Amino acid sequence: MKSNRNLSRSERLRPERGDGVNRAGGAAPSESAWGWGPTRIHKCRRSRVWLLAFAVGALISISACRQDMHNQPKYIPLRESAFFRNGSSARPLVEDTVARGTLQEDEAFFTGKSFGAEVTTLPFPLTKEVLDRGENRYNIFCSPCHDLAGTGQGMIVRRGYRQPPSFHSDRIRQAPIGHFFDVMTNGFGAMPDYRAQVAPRDRWAIAAYVRALQLSQHATAAELSPDDRQKLAQPASAPAEGAAKH
């Protein structure tokens, strides 16, 4: 037998050839012919075993997966129910209960009426801040139809929408302030309601501003203060030279 030192490179790398071992009929070597670990066929068999084990495990895990969070017993809106007597899955509100923050016990404030009659006074003190807020909300929600002066010639009307009555007609000027709040809350004629767009206090602020618009177009000198009447008696000042040129 040759010593390992005297073996050629090919004999050292492939000992079965140097020893004359019949590869076809002999037992499979524990290492590959190149001395690099298990033979390729053993690697392939081991890979197949692991792949089969992984596939079986995945199949077991999928079949055992529960869908309780996806297919849970629940009702979607408007679905019927065989459990409740009335056949509806939606449950009615308990009588005499009110959602938190929605109690409307002040009839005059939330409806503009008291015992069925439209109120004639603002349900809270009138201040400059209230009028400023009313002007702001009026310009946003009301002026497209009623215009900034309240004559009913807004841009929407000019484009074909039905013209609302002028705030300065005798009938509208004599209407109580609760009437404006009621119309904004429930709508009137071609006018839709604005209860969803405008809060109750803002509706009252708009009603107060409408009163200010009416007063601005029909105020008499007797209703003015002495200082304002004195200003009216003074002649109008001539425009400045720079303004006249423009």
Image: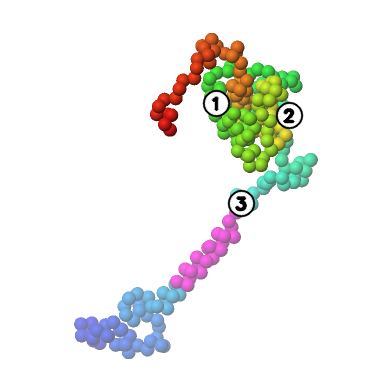
| Disc 2 target residue | 95
- In the image, taking residue 90 as reference, residue 217 lies left or right, namely left
What's the CA distance linking mark 1 and mark 3? 50 Å
> In the image, is residue 135 above or below residue 76?
above
Label 1: element kind: helix
Which residue is found at the position 62% from the left and 25% from the top?
210
The 10 Å Cα crowd at callout 3, few under 14, some 14 to 19, many 20 or more, is few
Query: Does 35 appear above or below 79?
Result: below
The residue wearing badge 1 is 133
Does the image show residue 27? yes
Rendering coords of residue 142 (x, y %): 61, 32
**Residue positioned 69% across, 45% down in the render:** 77
Closer to the chain start, of discs 3 and 2, is: 3
**Of circles 3 and 2, which is in front?**
2
Which of 55 and 30 lies nearest the eye of the viewer? 55
Name the element at disc 2: loop
Looking at the image, tell me whether mark 1 or mark 2 is earlier in sequence order.
Answer: 2
Judged from the image, the secondary structure of the residue bearing numbered disc 3 is loop
The residue mark sitting in front, 1 or 3, is 1
Disc number lying in front (1 or 2): 1
